[in-house]
Amino acid sequence: MAKAKDPVCGMMVDTEKAPAKGVYDGQTVYFCNPGCQKTYEARRKPK
């Protein structure tokens, strides 16, 4: 069982059971919930 750190809140997430994940710049990023994924995506958008 692999773990990854949610880049928004810092929570450790089981990569096999992550409630949300996405591929950004060719790398899979795991999130503890869809809200953290939305926050991450909003921060990535150019201003």
Image (cartoon, rainbow, N blue to C red):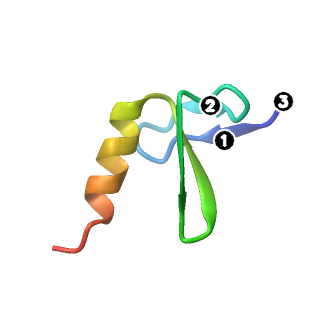
Q: Is residue 42 left or right of residue 20?
A: left
Occupied quadrant, residue 14: top right
Name which of mark 2 and mark 1 comes first in the sequence: 1
Q: Residues within 10 Å of mark 3 (few under 14, many from 20)?
A: few
Q: Secondary structure under badge 1?
A: strand
**C-alpha gap between disc 1 and disc 3:** 10 Å
| Mark 2 lies on residue | 13
- Image x and y of residue 42, in percent: 26, 55
Q: Amino acid at mark 2?
A: Val
- Image x and y of residue 23, in percent: 56, 58
Residue, x 44% and y 28% (percent of image)? 33
For residue 12, above or below residue 37: above
Q: Residues within 10 Å of mark 1 (few under 14, many from 20)?
A: some
Q: Amino acid at mark 1?
A: Ala
Q: Secondary structure under badge 2?
A: strand
9 or 37, which lies in front?
37
Residue placed furthest toward the right: 1
For residue 41, above or below residue 13: below
Occupied quadrant, residue 34: top left
Residue, x 32% and y 43% (percent of image)? 38
Q: Is residue 37 left or right of residue 5?
A: left
**C-alpha gap between disc 2 and disc 3:** 10 Å
Name which of mark 2 and mark 3 comes first in the sequence: 3
Q: Which mark is residue 47?
A: none
Residue placed furthest toward the left: 47
43 or 11, which lies in front?
43
Q: Secondary structure under badge 3?
A: loop
Q: Which mark is residue 1?
A: 3
Q: Amino acid at mark 3?
A: Met
| Mark 1 lies on residue | 4
Q: Quadrant of the N terminus?
A: top right
Q: Are marks 1 and 3 in contact (CB under 8 Å)?
A: no
